[in-house]
Image (cartoon, rainbow, N blue to C red):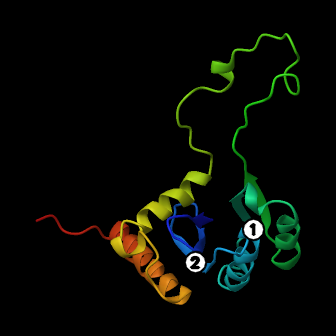
Amino acid sequence: MRGKKIWGRKRHALVDSLGNLMGIKVTGADWSDQQGSQPLLLSLKTRFPRMLLVWGDSHYGGHFITWLKVHLGWIMQTVKALREPKRGILVLEGENVDWDQLFPKGFHPLPRRWVIERSFAWITRWRRLCRDHEGLPESSEAFIALSASVGMLTRLAPPFPC
C-alpha cells in the first residue's frame, strides 16, 4: 500500500484485486504506514460498504489489524516474505537440508503484493509522477488519481489502431 519513488513523502494506496485505484493518500515521510492508512481507509468505508477483506504487507500488522476490525469491520491478511531459516533455530544442527529446493533462486513475486506494485508501476509511467514535484500532498493525490483514471479508461476502451 505504498510507493517509494519520492523523497519526503509516502503514497498510501488501496487498489482492488485487478489493480484499479480505489483511494490514495499522500503523507509526509515521518508518518508510519499505519498512521497514513487510517485516514485513507476511514474515508473509503462509506464508498465501499461491501468490502470485507484487505491485503497488506507486514508493516500493516499488529495493532492495525485490530483497529481495522473494530473501526471498519474489515479483516486484514498480511502478506509476508519468505525468510530463510537460520541453522540451529528452525533447522536442527547437523541436519542436511536442500536449500535450493526450499528457497529457489531468482525473483518470486509475493502473492497479492505484486498487484499494488504493478499499480504503482502503471501510475509512475507518467513522467510527472516518477518523483514528487508537487508542493501540496493534495496536488500529488489529484495527479495520481488522474493517472489511474486514464489507465482504467484505456483498459476499458483501448485506442483505435491507426
- x and y percentages locating residue 57 in the rendered image: 70, 56
- x and y percentages locating residue 64 in the rendered image: 83, 68
Relative horizontal placement of residue 97, taking residue 104 as reference (left or right)? right
Q: Classify 131 as above or below 84.
A: below
Q: Classify 152 as above or below 49.
A: above
Q: Classify 154 as above or below 46.
A: above
* Mark 2 element type: strand
Q: Nearer the viewer, residue 18 or 27?
A: 27
Q: Residue at x 69, y 75 (%)?
A: 30
- x and y percentages locating residue 146 in the rendered image: 42, 81
**Marks 1 and 2 in Cβ contact (< 8 Å):** no
Q: Nearer the viewer, residue 3 or 1?
A: 3
Residue type at mark 1 is Leu
| Quadrant of the image occupied by residue 85 | top right
Residue 10 marker: none
Residue type at mark 2 is Ile
Identify the residue under disc 1.
52
Q: Nearer the viewer, residue 86 or 1?
A: 86
**Quadrant that contains the N terminus:** bottom right
State the CA–CA distance, disc 1 to disc 2.
Answer: 19 Å
Count how many numbered circles sit on residues in the image. 2
Q: Nearer the viewer, residue 56 or 22?
A: 56
Relative horizontal placement of residue 61, taking residue 115 as reference (left or right)? right
Relative horizontal placement of residue 141, taking residue 67 as reference (left or right)? left
Identify the residue under disc 2.
24
Query: Closer to the N terminus: mark 1 or mark 2?
Result: 2
**Quadrant that contains the C terminus:** bottom left
* Mark 1 element type: loop
